[in-house]
Image: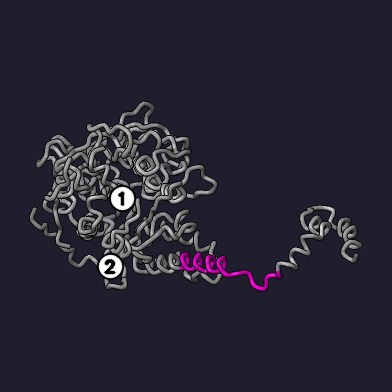
Amino acid sequence: MPPGLDNLKHIVVLMMENRSFDHMLGSLTAVNPQIDGITAALSNPDTTGAAVQPQPLAEFQGQLDPDPDHHFPAVDLQIFGGNTSPGRAANMQGFVKSYFNQQQDVGHSQKIMYYFAQNQLPVLTTLALEFAVFNRWFASIPGPTICNRAFAHYGTSFGRVDMDLLYVNEPFQSIYSRLINANPKHTAKLYYYDTTSSTMEITNLLQNQPELFGSYQQFLSDCSSGNLPDYSFVEPNYSDHDGDAGEEVASDQHPDHNVQAGELFIASVYNAIKSSPLWPNTALLVVYDEHGGIYDHVVPPACTPDQFTATANDTGTGMPFAFDRLGVRVPAILISPWIPAGTVVNRVFDHASIPATITKFFLRAFSPRSPRETSADVFIEPNAGTVDPARNLLSLGTMRTDCPDFDV
Amino acid sequence: MALIHVPRPKNAMDPDRPVNALLKTQMLHLHDAESKLPIGHRTDVYINAIKTEGEAANYIRQVTEAIHAAHAAAAKKRARPAAKRKPVIEIAAVADDGPVRKRTSAGANKTKKRAKTKPDRKS
């Protein structure tokens, strides 16, 4: 067994909000051409027909206001460029048109093509270059937050493509229930920032299993005491509010929240793990729930249909959706001292890969799981049987001692 | 590798920012959850009147804490030993009383069975 997998005991997932791959990490193609980001060939037409190229002019706050539309019909426009004919092909040509629809301002609509320069995001870009960055991690659904986050918890959104989710008598257990009810028992926790920020998984988990939740302060304490659960899911702060320690600035990076505050938060999570006794035994996935309506150039691929279908009425596009296409590409980075610097992963993943990976790693198997989850690829190989070296990202024979540190 | 400097945001705090669609959804989900709480744990907040992030955050905190409190109260109640349990010998005596047990488990025809059991109980 490779020592990285042999040592791995804890997996942490940090899910941020609403930024596309090109917007956050597209600049890195200039540093490492293997990273599939921004090139001079990319553009989107605006409503005058002019080609708008991506430019490194993104600002931390105040630029993407109003919040770019990322509900199902808008994302359909962004991906298919407004083509609604049968047999249409995705072309990623509708982002500027979609943003124009919100204010009818041609100049403002072009800002949806802006991306961050590498030096603006020292945390995310450093982690992407120093560990494993995924070229093909997509949102699970071409739609908004809640249904996409559901895929991270359940491997499905139970047929929903919107922000309303009800889990009544649904067949698939959350990854947390699978772990804590397993024999032998595993441990799992969701850490929200604080009770004022709370969680985005209220419909089922907070209402029925509040004991699964802890605060970010508890996460920090669990890291430093070496008591992290087997699986942790960390949520950022979703709102500006007054907390016990004073002013708490939203760190989720959801437009129009400050992107630098999110950088600080990512660095804080990373530092907490890196400075803990569990660093050799922990892998951290930093991933975004969906693209937030912001430009990305990679066409989302088709995927195994889920067993649910959203009706034409549900999608708002006049067409049903069988969950047979992924959403827009998002940033995703896997961090561990056993991963070689500069690793670029080209296999296809989506958020269903999260419960798929956790299940295979800790439980080996579990049934029932959604068709989308059972067909999703895993980003950490199970630590049993024969491990394919070509798939194992924690591949180093000895642990790195040159991993970055951030001054948080 | 050298320590990497992470810039701090300047003037980012704005609790008066209009509440965004995500927080509105979070409030709606919490409002639904709140409606299932015992009455004593509910807030009296009218969520349609919430306009700013700060107000939304305040409501979200109240309901999140209320959910935890309601579960804690229920767990405490479950853990409390049953008050004034009958002595074992008394329970055993009732258990020996066959007809009475039949009556408690029967769903229908209660009057008829009660009539049957009466003489037994007297005896």
Decide which of B65, A221 is in the foreground and name it: A221
Image spot of residue A49 (x, y percent)? 21, 37
**Membership of A260 in magenta stretch:** no
The chain to which mark 2 is attached is A
Are tags 2 and 1 found on a single chain? yes
Q: State the quadrant of the C terminus of chain A.
A: bottom left
Marks 2 and 1: which is nearer the front? 1
Q: Residues within 10 Å of mark 2 (few under 14, many from 20)?
A: many
Residue A10, label in figure: 1
Query: In the rendered structure, which segment of residues is drawn in magenta?
Result: B66-87
Q: Residue at x 31, y 46 (%)?
A: A290
Any part of residue A189 in sight: yes
Compared across the picture, whether B113 is left or right of A25 comes to right
Image spot of residue A298 (x, y percent)? 24, 36
Q: Residues within 10 Å of mark 1 (few under 14, many from 20)?
A: many
Residue A248, label in figure: 2
Badge 2 vs badge 1, beta-carbon distance below 8 Å? no
Q: State the quadrant of the N terminus of chain A.
A: top left
**Membership of B78 in magenta stretch:** yes
Q: Residue at x 43, y 69 (%)?
A: B62
Q: Main secondary structure of the magenta part?
A: helix
Q: SS of the residue at dot 2? A: strand
Residue at the limit of the structure toward the top, as seen here? A87
Image spot of residue B36 (x, y percent)? 54, 61
